[in-house]
């Protein structure tokens, strides 16, 4: 956290955010402390609205990037936008042209319309209401585009100047306030731009509500010498009606009416850019340069954008205890060691050339990653060598098994005894059969093959006809696999 920015009393700070790559980025942080003036339901409502706005990307709304919830405070982180609040730019002498003022209000109405029309994932309207639009919450950027800032965490009693722009239902803390309360605030800003003076100078909330409800608010006066601004009087009267039903039904409708009245006279963003550069260009550039260097001292005593209240401590969203203690311990407290009458010295901070962890934890921390990298490299080499060796062993075992496995045998081959195969015996030639004279009483001389086969080579009975027996071949022995060494 560098220093507070914006008007006094607003808890908005300029800060440097450190990324993982060691780069720094200038951001804006809205700090809401727990246990303070705001009750827990109010804090919960602001956190819920901030998370909804984080989903909105619109050129006329200051973007919310992240919401960090801590034990003692809530941090809403947003983009740092170079520019100047309308409260400062519009109050200068002689002041910007009125056509540029209308362009700024058109941008404000466009941003409010985007907020009012925001929906959730189920396309249900969220019904967001700004509820605190003042000239301090309108930032005219150095790019010529105006943006709506979030309402400060304060109620209607936050200041008489803020009360002059709030709708009566907001001043009365009525929960029924809707988007038409924001169109009332734009009408109040336009009233002062037309008339050239404050609307309710020095009045409290109750007095303002009494004048509005009694109809004693004077109408604005048209710009001298500009007849085309006369219709704006009725437009302001309608926007600031005490009854919300008589106002513009939406910010988009009011913006369309403002464009219709201004017509071609409406200033362009390029013209607004030139006005900002002429009025505050050097201050804006010098402020950003000093904040990016980590300086906590304002440019001069007349710079209302901040005050020296804090020292350069980086935001760590992850709340790493080691990094927080290393970053906060060696930095002395400016508030406790410097007299109040003396402005604190400038604390310079510049992004380190090495990764950010070397600046937060010491020089010995820079050698640790290199040693860990070498150990991881050696471990990866050993793993690769072990994998290659395992593949070689598996390949050798597979080849040996293929060489030594037994040959495949037919499933129908019967098992046989081991030993050399027996050679078949030769079959003796059989003489030609001799026909015998038929005899009635003679017995059958036919011999069955089984008998003949049973006595091969033996003597034949008288009168028998020899029948050759079929040779019986014995299959060869089956070779059994016997591993070596068994």
Image (cartoon, rainbow, N blue to C red):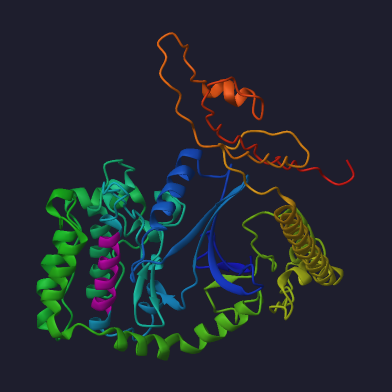
Which segment did they paint magenta? 101-114
Residue at x-position 81% and y-position 72%: 370
Residue 243 seen by the camera: no
Residue 323 located left or right of residue 61: right
Above or below for 146 versus 34:
below
Q: Position of residue 86 (x, y in %)?
A: 37, 74
Residue at x-position 16% and y-position 53%: 215
Q: Is residue 102 within the magenta segment?
A: yes
Q: Position of residue 139 (x, y in %)?
A: 40, 72
Quadrant for residue 187, please give it.
bottom left
Residue at x-position 56% and y-position 22%: 450
- Relative depth, front residue between 129 and 441: 441
Residue at x-position 76% and y-position 37%: 418
Q: Is residue 163 within the magenta segment?
A: no
- Relative depth, front residue between 224 and 392: 392
Q: Position of residue 383 (x, y in %)?
A: 77, 61
Q: Main secondary structure of the magenta part?
A: helix
- Name the image quarter holding the N terminus: bottom right
Residue 200 located left or right of residue 328: left
Q: Position of residue 377 (x, y in %)?
A: 78, 68
């Amino acid at each position: 956290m560098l220093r507070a920015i914006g008007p006094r009393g607003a808890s908005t700070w300029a800060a440097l955010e450190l990324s993982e790559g060691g780069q720094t980025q200038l951001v804006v942080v809205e700090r809401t402390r727990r246990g303070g003036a705001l009750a827990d339901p109010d804090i919960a409502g602001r956190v819920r609205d901030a998370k909804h706005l984080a989903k909105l990307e619109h050129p006329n709304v200051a973007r919310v990037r992240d919401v960090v919830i801590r034990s003692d405070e809530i941090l809403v982180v947003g983009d740092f936008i170079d520019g100047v609040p309308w409260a400062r730019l519009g109050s200068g002498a002689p002041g910007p042209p009125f056509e540029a003022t209308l362009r700024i209000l058109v941008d404000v109405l466009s941003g409010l319309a985007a907020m009012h029309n925001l929906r959730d994932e189920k396309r249900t309207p969220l019904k967001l209401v700004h509820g605190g639009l003042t000239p301090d919450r309108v930032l005219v950027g150095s790019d010529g585009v105006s943006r709506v800032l979030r309402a400060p965490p304060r109620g209607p009693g936050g200041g008489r100047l803020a009360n002059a722009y709030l709708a009566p239902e907001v001043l009365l803390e009525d929960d029924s306030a809707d988007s038409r309360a924001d169109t009332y605030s734009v009408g109040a800003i336009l009233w002062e731009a037309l008339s050239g003076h404050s609307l309710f100078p020095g009045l409290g909330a109750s007095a303002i509500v009494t004048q509005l409800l009694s109809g004693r608010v004077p109408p604005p006066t048209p710009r001298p010498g500009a007849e085309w601004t006369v219709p704006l009087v009725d437009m302001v009267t309608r926007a600031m009606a005490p009854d919300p039903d008589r106002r513009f039904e939406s910010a988009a409708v009011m913006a369309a009416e403002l464009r219709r009245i201004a017509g071609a006279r409406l200033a362009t963003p390029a013209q607004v850019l030139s006005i900002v550069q002429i009025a505050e260009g050097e201050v804006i550039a010098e402020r950003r340069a000093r904040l990016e260097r980590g300086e906590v001292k304002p440019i001069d005593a007349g710079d209302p954008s901040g005050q020296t209240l804090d020292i350069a401590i980086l935001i760590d969203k992850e709340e790493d205890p080691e990094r927080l203690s290393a970053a906060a311990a060696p930095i002395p407290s400016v508030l406790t060691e410097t007299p109040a009458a003396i402005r604190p010295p400038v604390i310079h901070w510049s992004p380190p050339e090495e990764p950010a962890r070397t600046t937060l934890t010491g020089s010995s921390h820079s050698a640790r990653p290199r040693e860990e990298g070498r150990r991881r490299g050696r471990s990866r080499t050993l793993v690769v060598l072990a994998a290659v060796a395992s593949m070689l062993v598996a390949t050798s075992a597979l080849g040996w098994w293929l060489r030594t496995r037994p040959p495949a045998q037919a499933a129908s081959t019967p098992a046989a005894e081991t030993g050399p195969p027996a050679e078949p015996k030769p079959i003796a030639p059989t003489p030609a059969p001799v026909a015998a004279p038929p005899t009635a009483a003679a017995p059958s001389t036919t011999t069955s093959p089984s008998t003949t086969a049973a006595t091969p080579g033996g003597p034949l009975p008288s009168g028998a006809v020899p029948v050759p027996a079929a040779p019986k071949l014995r299959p060869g022995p089956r070779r059994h696999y016997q591993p070596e060494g068994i």
